[in-house]
Amino acid sequence: MSQMLPDRHWTRDEIAALFDLPFTELVFRAAEVHRTHHAANEVQLSTLLSIKTGGCPEDCGYCSQSASAETGLKATKLMDVRAVLQAAAQARDNGSTRFCMGAAWRNPKDKDIPALAEMVRGVRQMGMETCMTLGMLTPGQADALAAAGLDYYNHNIDTSPENYANVISTRSFEERIETLENVRDAGINVCCGGIVGMGETRDDRVGFIHALASLPVHPESVPINALVPVKGTVLGNMLADTPLAKIDDIEFVRTVAVARITMPDSMVRLSAGRESMSDAAQTLCFLAGANSIFTGEKLLTAGNAGEGKDAALFAKLGLTPMAAEQRLVEAAE
């Protein structure tokens, strides 16, 4: 990775102008930025494990784990530390260099932190990069996870500030930002992105990227998700049977490209929704600067492409999985 320079904070008009570029010009510019800041043909393989599923009191309209969703998903308790570490070891053996752990909480309780810290320490001892997403964090909880060695904390803003209330009512956009500040103050790298294809407008996608690219420090990790409509969720019921609501592949690639240009040093993570993307659409995302994917058969609760399909695509494209040692060095820089 190139030497880190002070982050440029893009204006909303500048970001809108990027979105409006001819598609080939936009992807070309994004590819140039990507090759300046990252290895051109290397993609990090990550694995995401739900360590506590369902029963979340938040009402996020896209989420099957919300207690208000009618998806039949049963709530579980926090997984045993040993079971989490066994899953991490399997992920490492399958080529993942990053292990992400997600719990369906509004926020963790202080009594949960020792077990979470033990998970972090165990995964790091395997030589993997660690990430957790647990909901909102207090400064003390963030400090405790930092002391355990947590590399990244994921807390997505989900969409633009203007569209946020259309998706979630139980947690404000400002509360999201507060958790990001607590994470940053603790010395943990920030993983923050969102979801497109939730019925938002192009202007909302501009606002989403602007909110990320105008943070005091750009997120080190930016996951870009395409909505997976799940019947029984608010958005799933609205959009699952509406073909026109699914975001166009070209518009999705545009979002990836603009994220790459505006946040050049960030890892841009091609996340949920890949299982329904064509090889061609994913290839355009890699060309536009995406350099991390979640591999395996499942994300938290949604389906995923699977290692075999990913390996075949990588072979077809000549892509190389990023080495663990390289990412650990970059994360420390």
Image: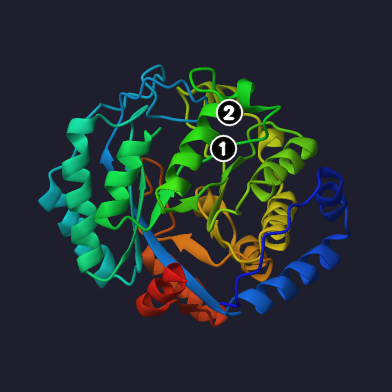
Q: Position of residue 41 (x, y in %)?
A: 57, 79
User: Crowding at label 2, few (<14), some or many (≥20) Cα neighbours within 10 Å?
Assistant: some
Residue 108 visible in the shown view: yes
Q: Residue at x 17, y 42 (%)?
A: 114
Q: Residue at x 61, y 66 (%)?
A: 265
Q: Residue at x 51, y 28 (%)?
A: 175
Name the N-terminal-most of marks 2 and 1: 1
Q: Quadrant of residue 305?
A: bottom left
The residue carrying mark 2 is 173
Label 2 secondary element: helix
Location of the N terminus (image quadrant)? bottom right
Q: Which amino acid, mark 2?
A: Phe
Q: Are marks 2 and 1 in contact (CB under 8 Å)?
A: yes
Q: Position of residue 171 (x, y in %)?
A: 50, 22
Viewed as shown, does residue 305 lie left or right of 18? left
Q: Residue at x 74, y 35 (%)?
A: 204
Q: Which amino acid, mark 1?
A: Ile
Image vertical order of residue 47 relative to residue 97, above or below: above
User: Crowding at label 1, few (<14), some or many (≥20) Cα neighbours within 10 Å?
Assistant: many
Label 1 secondary element: loop
The residue carrying mark 1 is 157
Q: How is the image coloured?
A: rainbow
Residue 77 visible in the shown view: no
